[in-house]
Image: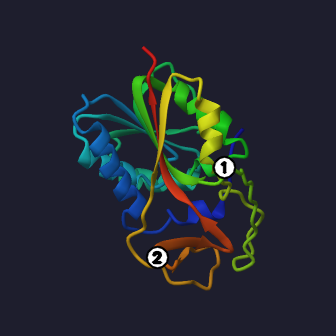
């Protein structure tokens, strides 16, 4: 299935920007988990403007990087942002991409929640891992045992109906993978700054609970952001 014209997801990467906080934290998480690992093959799913890929190339020396992206406009921007002597950029659908060559590390940010059946997509990504390979995903994985599919239409910019805000439970993923040769864990994402409410309701803002913890809200939806890590433990 070829996706998607998600205006919210695409537009955020079509202008100049700094590395996002979750991208910075993902780099630190991977460095902590894989810092001593021998360099191998690395796939970034939905690489968008390739700014995250550019940071990975700088942070992890001698790895062989591939960036996968389906959106033409994002690929054009990616090719402007990164030297293709350092990475391979390919136009493919992240939900169905197949390769005979397995990967040692796969990363994906904000992508899994776009798909109506993220479990099928996740299975495909796991198949791409070499034995011992690791998958790092940033996204919304709610801590309540309830799956939600959310479509939205932003009247602020007169958008069409879009996806990208689905939120499946952490327990759903755990049950789905419990008999597989994988390990799974979730690490909470902690946003280090306050975000002011914007006139555009699709832009995230924060409020604080009674303990001073930041709650991230998009539109009228509380977002539970985590890093999902999966390791292929098959021999």
> Which label lies toward us, 2 or 1?
2
Q: Position of residue 166 (x, y in %)?
A: 68, 54
Q: Residue at x 52, y 46 (%)?
A: 46
* Residue 9 in sight here: yes
Q: Position of residue 211 (x, y in %)?
A: 46, 76
Circle 1 sits on which residue? 168
**Marking on residue 211:** 2
Q: Position of residue 76 (x, y in %)?
A: 49, 53
Looking at this view, is 3 or 133 the one in front? 133
Vertical placement of residue 113 versus 161, above or below: above
Q: Residue at x 59, y 46 (%)?
A: 170
Looking at this view, is 31 or 90 the one in front? 31
If the image is split into quadrants, where does the C terminus sit? top left
Dot 2 falls on a residue whose secondary structure is loop
Q: Quadrant of residue 42?
A: top left
Vertical placement of residue 48 versus 214, above or below: above
Looking at this view, is 129 or 209 the one in front? 209
Q: Residue at x 59, y 23 (%)?
A: 179
Dot 1 falls on a residue whose secondary structure is strand
Question: Mark 2 and mark 1: span between their CA atoms?
Answer: 26 Å
Looking at this view, is 80 or 115 the one in front? 115
* Residue 93 in sight here: no
């Amino acid at each position: 299935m070829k996706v998607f014209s998600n205006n919210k997801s695409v537009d955020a990467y079509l202008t100049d920007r700094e590395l996002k906080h979750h991208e910075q934290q993902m780099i630190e998480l991977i460095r902590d988990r894989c810092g001593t690992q021998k360099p191998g093959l690395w796939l970034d799913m939905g690489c968008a403007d390739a700014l995250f890929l550019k940071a990975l190339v700088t942070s992890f020396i001698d790895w062989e990087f591939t960036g996968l992206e389906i959106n033409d406009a994002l690929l054009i921007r990616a090719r402007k942002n990164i030297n293709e002597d350092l990475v391979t950029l390919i136009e493919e659908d992240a939900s169905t991409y197949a390769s005979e060559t397995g990967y040692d590390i796969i990363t994906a940010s904000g992508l899994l929640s776009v798909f109506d059946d993220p479990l099928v997509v996740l299975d495909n990504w796991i198949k791409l891992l070499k034995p011992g390979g690791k998958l790092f995903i940033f996204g919304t994985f709610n801590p309540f045992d309830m799956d939600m599919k959310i479509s939205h239409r932003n009247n602020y910019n007169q958008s069409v109906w879009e996806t990208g805000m689905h939120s499946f439970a952490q327990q759903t993923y755990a049950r789905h993978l419990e008999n597989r040769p994988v390990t799974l864990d979730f690490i909470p994402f902690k946003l280090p700054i306050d975000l002011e409410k914007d006139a555009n309701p699709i832009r995230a803002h924060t409020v604080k609970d009674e303990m001073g913890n930041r709650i991230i809200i998009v539109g009228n939806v509380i977002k539970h952001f985590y890093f999902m890590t999966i390791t292929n433990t098959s021999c």
